[in-house]
Image: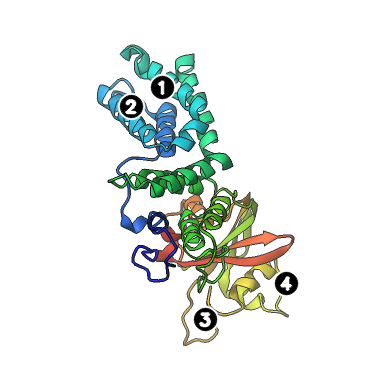
Amino acid sequence: MLTDYNVSDHWSADDPDWLKSLVSSLDRGHGVSTVLPLTVVVEEILEWLERASGVDAWKTNANRASLRLDLAESVGALGPSLRALVSTSLAQFQASFSQLIGSPKTFLSQPPGTRTDPVWTNVTATARRLLAALDADEAVAASWDDLVATAQNRTLESREYRPIAELLFDQVSRRGLSALWTFRDLASVVAFGRSRGGVPVGRTDVPVQERIASARALVSTPAEVEPVVVWLGYLGPAFPHLSAGRVSFIDAHWAVPNAEPGGQSFEHMAELWELVRDGGLFKVARRADEESDVDFLVRIDLGTTTAAGALNRAVRGRRSGAAPLAAAAQVHNRGRCNRGFVAARMGLAAEQR
């Protein structure tokens, strides 16, 4: 949880009250909105278009009414800057969606795979265009502008900022960034005027507008796309080295000791050494009276992608049903391997966003 900057004592006497409210609005510990972000609603409608079938799908009045109300609420919660930016793609999607839900029930009962009529395909096409517009750098910056404007508006009596903050959180996450850490960085930039990754101590002299501009630049910067590799450790019967496409299975009892300098060479040796060199990950027994943390390792090459959520993507992709006892993600940049996230089994979910 973030520090509650409304009650923090670091503020300068010149800092306006709305700045404190803005920083506190970035803390999801204050509760979440009952209004779903527009991105979530549009994704749900897309999923219904592609998969929902049978008597409980589109021809049921209650289902269509629920989707319509969710969409109306999410659109109503948009801030003016974002609304103006995506107005064209939003209007096109709303028109095509209204045409679909107003169609006869005999038409709406068509199962997935047969929905080739333009009434169906127009909703899909306009939904994807709207999502692309909401994912753009300019759209994320517009949501930030709306959040700032809401904090500055002292006539508001409720938590009007909350749905805007929730949408911004989802926009950041959809762009391949860790929204949780991005919001923490935003809070520090606005509260202290520090740069991302800096030490939040003693900076209260940065002008407010400079802090807001820095935060805007931070939140609208897209995630870096880099080669990402994930290593997972499991207990169970060990087996010889086996590779299948982007996935490799490795006997931890043999590979971990041999990863040390001077050990027997094997594929991905340097990567593994970067992870185990300090002895904190993938421990294996060296003596009879010791116990191993893992018996075998699984290396998953996720390809060129964003690093945020890499562990969870790799775990879900294995589909084995067994949770790893230890895991690590690495980002490879210009031939160098940098140690990234490390998590225990129970901590993996926290890394997802």
Q: Position of residue 75 (x, y in %)?
A: 39, 32
338 or 274, nearer to the observer: 338
Q: Give whichever of discs 2 and 3 has the lower sequence position.
A: 2
Query: Looking at numbered disc 4 in the image, what kind of residue is underneath it?
Result: Ser
Contact (Cβ within 8 Å) of mark 2 with mark 1: yes
Q: Residue under circle 2?
A: 68
Q: Position of residue 333 (x, y in %)?
A: 70, 60
Question: Which image quadrant for residue 242?
Answer: bottom right
> Residue drawn at (36%, 13%), measured in percent from left and top?
103
46 or 76, nearer to the observer: 76
Q: Residue under circle 3?
A: 285
Q: Secondary structure at mark 2?
A: helix
Q: Vertically, is 310 above or below 119?
A: below
**Crowd around label 2: few <14 · some 14–19 · many ≥20 (10 Å):** some
Q: Nearer the viewer, mark 3 or mark 1?
A: 1
322 or 95, nearer to the observer: 95
Q: Give whichever of discs 2 and 1 has the lower sequence position.
A: 2
337 or 258, nearer to the observer: 337
Q: CA distance from mark 2 to mark 1?
A: 9 Å
Q: Residue under circle 1?
A: 97
